[in-house]
Amino acid sequence: MTVNFIRNPDLTINIGKIKLKNPVIVASGTFGFGEEYEDFLNLNHLGAIIPKGISLKPMVGNPPPRIFETESGILNFIGLQNPVLQDFIKNKLPHFKNIKTNLIINFFGNTQKEYTELARCFDGVPGISGLEMNISCPNVERGGMAFCSEPKIVYRLVCAVRKSTKLTLIVKLSPNVTDIAAIAKSAEEGGADAVSLVNTFKAMAINIRSRKPELGNIIGGLSGPAIKPIALRMVWEVSQTVNIPVIGMGGIMKTEDAIEFILVGASAVQIGTANLVNPRTAIEVIQGIKHYLIQNKMPRIQKLIGLFKN
Ligand SMILES: Cc1cc2nc3c(=O)[nH]c(=O)nc-3n(C[C@H](O)[C@H](O)[C@H](O)COP(=O)(O)O)c2cc1C
């Protein structure tokens, strides 16, 4: 039977063992712990929430200024100021019990041991749907960059973390590498259930009056509309290389941007910087994707993934 009119397209997507009610996730570091956004939108409608990255040991973050607005994006140098594991489980996690969406934990370590220990600690904690392992932060001096840029190291690290948890494991990739598809392949071979990309691009801005950097430590990470075309290219390359789901992000500000990422192969998308401009972006994108499917007479979001014609 041909479907002529679709009222309620199926937006559900599976990422490993995680069932998303729609493919729209709010990105780590840009949505606090969810509660900060409760006045603006119904969190139950989101595909998933990914809070700020969690570490084993406390990190104070970097000296200010930590955020600088550029013409078409923001430069941040937060340096992973964040709650540590026990603090998160005790003080933040209980709040998520009342929210009917997936909670995906973003975490990072300075050593392989820290990564595996964190993964083990979250395994089996009620209320956690999956893990997003950040091997990509450009703002931490130790660990982050070294882990992200060498396929063999990524493979070893992901293998070790894989053995430490039964939770769905998403590996978040850095764009600051020569061949992101090779890194994604290593993550897949190491046992990742999915990859997410991209994190921020290393960038800088200077003040011509003071002749000093706009950020506390000269170099920070660029996000927002400026990075979208590059992120899109990377998501396309990775989608053609791996057989696991790809979660795309980088400068998604509106529905059309999200659809571009899905067309080049993303099974789901993350909204980051846009949350800081319009806190309702994720909800608007969910509605927009639904309308696009209705207009194009598509009964399921699955049908849209990778439909890009080249
Ligand atoms: C202020 C800020 C803080 C961030 N903190 C984290 C973090 O803790 N962990 C992480 O994996 N990514 C972090 N990110 C990166 C975002 O999750 C996302 O990958 C990146 O900003 C690109 O998407 P966007 O252009 O939609 O913002 C942060 C980004 C911003 C702007």
Image (cartoon, rainbow, N blue to C red):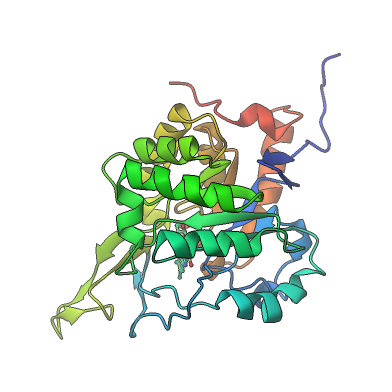
Which residue appears at 69% of the width and 39% of the height? 14
**Number of disc labels:** 0
Q: Is residue 185 above or below residue 173?
A: above
Residue sitting at x 66%, y 73%: 37
Which quadrant would residue 113 be assigned to in this image? bottom left
Where residue 57 appears, as percent x and y from the top left, is 48, 77
User: Where is residue 19, by image quadrant?
Assistant: top right
Q: Is residue 70 left or right of residue 7?
A: left
Residue 71 in sight: no
For this rendering, which residue is in front, 95 or 191? 191
The image shows residue 77 at horizontal and vertical percentages of 35, 73
Q: Residue at x 55, y 55 (%)?
A: 132
- Give me the residue at 82% from left, 22% from top: 4
In the picture, the quarter occupied by the N terminus is top right
Q: Is residue 294 left or right of residue 282?
A: right
Return the x and y of residue 147 as percentages of the image width and height. 35, 54
Q: Residue furthest right?
A: 1
Q: Nearer the viewer, residue 64 or 54?
A: 54
Above or below, 48 against 99 in this view is above
Judged left or right of residue 54, residue 71 is left
Give the camera-side residue of 179 and 262: 179
On-image quarter of the C terminus = top left
Query: Is any part of residue 88 visible from this angle?
Result: yes
Where residue 236 sits in the image (x, y, percent)?
43, 34
Indicate left or right for 65 with 307 as reference.
left
